[in-house]
Image (spheres, grey):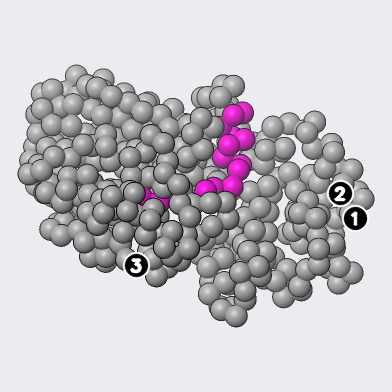
Amino acid sequence: MKMHRQLAEAAVAVVEAVFGGRGVLDHALGKVLGGNPRWGKRDRGFVAGTVFEVVRWRRALGFVADSEEVRALCAAQWVRDGYELPDWWEYRGLGVDGMRDRERELSGQRRAVRESVPDWLDEVAGGELGDAWDRELTALNGRAAVFLRVNRLKGTREEAVAWLAGHGVEAREVPGVADGLVLGSGKVLPKPLLAEGRVEIQDAGSQLVGPMVDPQPGEVVIDACAGAGGKTLHLAALSGGRAKLVAMDVVPGKLEELKRRADRAGVRGVRTEVIGPGTVAGWAGKADRVLIDAPCSGLGTLRRQPDLKWRLSAERLEELRALQRRILREYAGMVRVGGRVVYATCSVLPSENHGAAETLSGSGEFAIVDERVVSPAATGFDGFYAAVLERRA
């Protein structure tokens, strides 16, 4: 297979922006693709595929190419993909034959190199998960499927499948995920269909959190770290639109996006509130249920966000652990006695998950009554954790 120079250079520019700390992968890639609307599906797929795989396999490709130069890393990925390296592609690293020899030697390298993660992360995760880290890491290095959540306020899952099929999009039901659909390999959802509000792009693992909140009609339900509202909209659908939902976040812009998505989904009556001094205290003991989808490392989402592992540091992870415990301790006070707090993360690390929930239950005021660990290796979903804590006093 042959390559086009403009596309190859575009892929390099995105990877250099990501590794140079000048951009998040999705944003940097989106900017380049948006600036070249004439590129066809194959061209866009080449650029996006190169970027994601080079970022994902940075260390492994560095070993194969015997170079950390981005142009060499891209060359090694293209050799893996079966492309011919053109004469005009200049880089500092091994030639094709040398890279093929090193590829055969890769399986004998230590895990952090062959599975392409920073040494510190391999040590931390290996220490916390033991042998399970091998399985989870292999799964997290795979390519992510596109999962959809059916908006039951606008129809059943069966109706959504038929509607998508009518627009040429094949989707299958996800066993064990009541509102979940998955698209075929390599498929995407056209933006005009997303604008209909009948389905939302949401990983199947994320969709398992809402049912643990179990919002009931008439209850006051706070989504305390709502962001752009993916889980808020799910909670609205689960309650048939009859729970009294309050979406909170520290970033006003995210709540504005939530309002736009809610309108698209036909969700009415969601109250939004920017968290500021006195917000949490003002809601003390007033909520029936509180969802705390806490800031976390995001390590459960590495298949769709492989750049996270290069942006995260041991110091930042420790800061996140402390933040999770502080938020959990403070925000839990918004629930009434007898009510429930659901603490959730998209991490696979027990220290961010059960370890954090245990700090609240250890006080005696709350008790863990249910827990769920969503394993990427076991499910093919993103990694998630959720704990239900009942307030006893």
> Residue at image x 71%, y 38%?
113
Q: Residue 59, position in %: x, y? A: 71, 45
Q: Amino acid at mark 2?
A: Met
> Residue at image x 86%, y 72%?
88
> Quarter of the image containing the C terminus?
top left
- Which residue in the rendered view is the most extreme toward the bottom? 38
**Residue range highlighted in magenta:** 134-150
Please name the residue that numbered disc 3 is placed on.
195
Taking 162 as reference, is 264 above or below it? below
Quadrant position of residue 227 = bottom left
Please name the residue that numbered disc 2 is placed on.
99
On the picture, is 77 further left or further right than 30?
Answer: right
Q: Residue 192, position in %: x, y? A: 39, 70
Taking 320 as reference, is 36 above or below it? below
> Quarter of the image containing the N terminus?
bottom right
Within 10 angstroms of label 3, few (less than 14), some, or many (20 or more) residues?
few
Rounded to the nearest angstrom, the CA distance separating label 2 from label 1 is 6 Å
Q: Residue 358, position in %: x, y? A: 31, 23
Please name the residue that numbered disc 1 is placed on.
95
Q: Amino acid at mark 1?
A: Gly
Q: Are marks 2 and 1 in contact (CB under 8 Å)?
A: yes
On the picture, is 120 further left or further right than 75?
Answer: left
Frontmost residue, 203 versus 311:
203
Task: Tell us which disc is closer to us: 3 or 1.
Answer: 3
- Which residue in the rendered view is the most extreme toward the right? 97
